[in-house]
Image (cartoon, grey):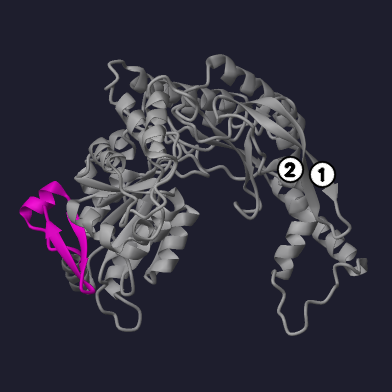
Amino acid sequence: MPNLDVGHCSPPFIASFNTLFLMTIVFLLGKLRDLFDLSIRKKTRKGYAPIRDPYEDFYQRRMFSRIQDCWNRPIASAPGAWINVMNRTSIEHSSGFVQLQLTGGDRRCLNLGSYNYLGFAAADEYCTPRVLKTLNDYSVSTCSTRMEAGTTAVHEELEAEVAKFVGKEAAITFGMGYATNSAVIPALMGKGCLIISDSLNHASIVAGARGSGAKIKVFKHNDAQHLEAVLRTSIAEGQPRTHRPWKKIMIIVEGIYSMEGEACILKEIVELKKKYRVYLYLDEAHSIGALGRTGRGCCEHWGVNPADVDVMMGTFTKSFGSCGGYIAGSHDLINYLRHHGPAYLYATSMSPAAAQQIISAIRLINGEDGTSRGLDKVRQLHENANYFRRELIKKGFHVLGDIDSPVMPIMIYHPGKLPAFSRRCLDLGLAMVVVGFPATALLLTRARVCISASHTREDLDYALKVINHVGTICMIRYNVKEQAEQLLWQIEHDAPPTCSEGGKSLGRGRDQDKVGKQAAVNGKLNGKAQQNGVANLVKANGAVKVKMT
């Protein structure tokens, strides 16, 4: 089978040259305007430092404010296959800031921007009546934390359903997906621990890792060989200065990377996790519900035992049409988080109605409504995603992502073409998300398509027609014939996306004893635990214990 590398596209030379030239001109002209604009040179209050960084202030005034209409577009309808986007007009101030003001009207657009993967965001004949009943029984909010008066029978039912759905012993839920990562990671990792993170992990993971106080090392995106090199070096060298063994080592990856549309190479990572006896934290925010034959995420997609993933994280804001996030794992892990997780202890619990929406969606996927409608949604999502990706590549676009992934970035590269592409698509009734600097590298500007099971083939064909038309005008149809042929080959043969081979052994030397000692520190696995491939994460009195199942 040919090696498909659809997730890595290099910007054409002419696009790179034009981008750097354009940004240089814009920067120089902006600085020149500031030089003669007295309102910009106002001094701050005496004794006070500038509240905003000067370069961030310059970027917002002279660059971002001129194209900010491409983001934060308010809507006036449910985020279904089609949405009503509210119209806005620009008001420019003398300081250079541009203010957007609603005009009162809206336009009907095909929705390619929401994470409504399975179509549960709009009204559903099975889910909506149950949500309304729960809203009537429990009201909108519990007005309390989970540890006080914020736990209802609905919350407990939700956690049991989530644990069963993902194949773990227990689960704990939180009211916000971002906070799930940013609050749980510091509760599990601390000083003397090591976090090895994929280079393209989400900002919530980055925030949680930084807040933990643990040492952070980064490995190349989806590169098992580099991950193993980082593991071996880190274990051999130990902690900085003291060279003591690490208290814990944890690998953190995502199921689907939201800016790339790529699935993680879970099989190779699990092999390394077992080999070096380190913990694995899997963020399934975009993959749960979207990958796998029954929507159970990355483990089902790759045929990996969920027991091999120590900490399984996910959110309900994408496939389930609700809010919040979850952590699934062993009973010991979940009980520990109930007593040490700040997002559980101090934050208001999830709305019972939102929790009921998730329960109903999971049961629908499981077929508990007596139909196959839930599984049909998963199947339709995969068909829509693969069809749309195939057609985009056939038309000459650089498209990132893997088979079955509902996220597909269309590479624009040139930041000057980003607002033109976004505005023209909106004018033609297509609502899309565009991403540029500083969210991505300067030369990796892109438009991101999010496919839904609620999209019909007519919807997708209309979107392809608009994107092809606008892409031709903006000259972003970069010819990649070989890439198209390889992707078509995989789809026709129903093959999973090709991943890089697992990292090879780097050899054994005088550091082997340190490697062996560190493996023992991270978990003395007996024969049964090695077979099951699971070790429970527990902290007690500042020490680390490993309990076997």
Q: Which mark's residue is nearer the viewer, 1 or 2?
A: 1
Q: Residue 432's x, y, as percent? A: 63, 34
Within 10 Å of disc 1 (Cα), the crowding (few <14, some 14-19, many 20+) is: some
Question: In what element is the residue under mark 1?
Answer: strand
Quadrant for residue 374, please give it: top left
Dot 2 amino acid type: Asp
Q: Is residue 219 above or below residue 157?
A: below
Q: Residue 447's x, y, as percent? A: 62, 38
Residue 69 bears which disc, if any? 2
Q: Which residue is mark 1?
A: 90
Camera sees residue 287: no
Label tally: 2
Using residue 543 as the reference point, say whether residue 53 is left or right of it.
Answer: right
Q: Is residue 72 magenta?
A: no
Q: Which residues are magenta?
A: 522-549
Camera sees residue 400: yes
Q: Is residue 409 above or below residue 199?
A: above
Query: The N terminus lies in which quarter of the figure?
Result: top left
In-front residue for pair 526/158: 158
Quadrant for residue 289, please give it: top left
Q: Residue 441's x, y, as percent? A: 61, 53
Q: Residue at x 74, y 52 (%)?
A: 64
Dot 1 amino acid type: Ser
